[in-house]
Amino acid sequence: MTDACDLTARAARALIGAKKLSPVELLESCIGRIEAVDHAVNAMVARDFDRARATARAAEQAVMHGDALGALHGLPVGIKDLENTAGLRTTFGSPLFADNVPATDDRTVVCVRAAGAIVVGKTNTPEFGAGANTRNAVYGATGNPFDPSRSAAGSSGGSAVALATGMVPLASGSDMGGSLRNPAAFCGITGFRPTPGLVATEMRGFGWSPLAVNGPMARTVGDVALMLSVMASDDSRDPLATTIHGRQVRRPEDFSPLPEIDLSRLRVAITPDFGFAPTERIVRAAFAEKIATFTSAFARAEEATPDCAGADDAFAVLRAVGFLAAHEEKVRLHPDKVGPNVRGNVADGRAYSAMDVARATTAQTQLYRRWQAFFGDYDVILTPAISISPRPWSELFPREIDGVATQSYFHWLALAYAVTLAGHPAVCLPVGRDAAGMPFGLQIVGPRGGDAFVLGVAQALERIVAENPSTARPLPDLARLRAAPPISDMPGFIGFS
């Protein structure tokens, strides 16, 4: 990978600022990569090339005129198809919105455009983000860049694949049950779930719920932090975007540059499963192998986990209630145009009682308080980012792990939703491959509100793992993808199941 589109976002931005790389040249490199490999993986599903080219030309003129340049000036970006983009098709992966063209941008899109980013197109997602397998009845399935017949996970699967293959240097994502972290792990890139409220959004129907957040995705920790520096913002429409009247709480300089963290001073907890997550043997083996190569860098590293009792039930109830609020009317009026994951969540939501919700909310609060006590003894937690190695995308979700049946279509995401319930920031860092030759992702969980800190830890660890061929970030075979047949020719490409 030597093309301009393979540069890190930070490197490309520095070259643009120094007048050594034209935004037009960078964009054309990205468009060339999309046109060369996307037929094999189906990541960039709605394209805005004409407008992007016009924006790139204007960005080039701004550089040549010596204008003030934003943090993302001239950088192409992919936007997840759950976020509204003015004048660009936004389907949410649903046939109900197949022809939807919004008039306005969502706040996160406003932020990246204002910082100078160039929106290239929309990245694929499962219907309404339901499920960690990126496939839908509008655009079809997205294939893993290391094997297009396998899942890219999700729901930010299109963003992860676009990044891994060099289609864009930055992409947006969102996360409830690991929707940023899961595809980052499957595709060998970096995804960050921020503290709820750090990245303000006006789009959550349940504005007071901390489960769903927006966040940045990139190929390196530094690039994630760069994008976060412009996404972190206040917005009075988001009740979780905590503010102090008259004071700026969210500052770009908190994340760019990141703080330098001395790993030798850290107390680290290591757990393959948080004591309850159904983690596949191949993942447990890869986790043990990878961490053995760098645990000596820490002051103390030992097996330990916070008590996650009640996590499965609490997440199931709170997730279902959220889906009930957002999608009950769609399921009731258009059941034939809504997929099984959404229908199932809505049905569960209808069945739960107020007592169930009270029990789940109480359990979440108790889990949160146990986590705070745990972080009195540890600085970060290391876990696998996801519980299985990538499987064929034709399997809607894993119905078993090592021969044991899963409890629901999202049970295999327990390593992610334990963190979601606690509300802590977490980053997925690519750390080599597993025994099946597929990317392996390490989840690094930070303390309450420790977004810059945990990213600093990830950046320090990224430098260490990059020096070892067995832990360095894996790269997909682009020549193989160029020569691959269209993923759309695979059986079952279009549809819900």
Image (spheres, helix red, strand yellow):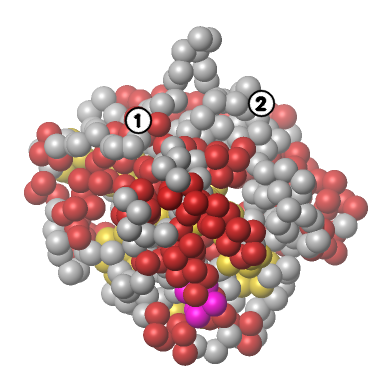
Left or right, residue 261 beside residue 22: left
Above or below residue 297? Residue 40 is: below
Q: Which residue is drawn at 50% across and 79% down?
A: 37
Q: Residue at x 24, y 41 (%)?
A: 457
Q: Is residue 377 visible?
A: yes
> For the N terminus, which image quadrant?
bottom left
Q: Can residue 175 be seen in this view?
A: no
Q: Residue at x 48, y 47 (%)?
A: 62
**Alpha-carbon span between mark 2 and mark 1:** 24 Å
In front: mark 2 or mark 1?
A: 1
Left or right, residue 51 beside residue 8: right
Q: Name the residue under label 2.
A: 237
Q: What element carries label 1?
A: helix
Specify the segment rendered in magenta. Answer: 33-37
> At label 1, which amino acid type do we have?
Glu
Q: What element carries label 2?
A: loop
> At label 2, which amino acid type do we have?
Arg
Residue 425 is tagged as none
10 Å crowding of disc 2: few (<14), some (14-19), many (20+): few
Question: Is 381 one of the magenta-colored residues?
Answer: no
Q: Residue furthest right?
A: 333
Left or right, residue 435 beside residue 497: left
Along the polypeptide, which appears first: circle 2 or circle 1? 2
Residue 384 is situated, as x and y percent measured from the top left of the image, at 34, 55
Q: Name the residue under label 1.
A: 253
Above or below residue 53? Residue 107 is: above
Residue 89 is situated, as x and y percent measured from the top left of the image, at 73, 58
Do the numbered discs 2 and 1 sit on residues whose CB atoms are within 8 Å?
Answer: no
Above or below residue 202? Residue 289 is: below
Magenta-colored segment: predominant secondary structure: helix
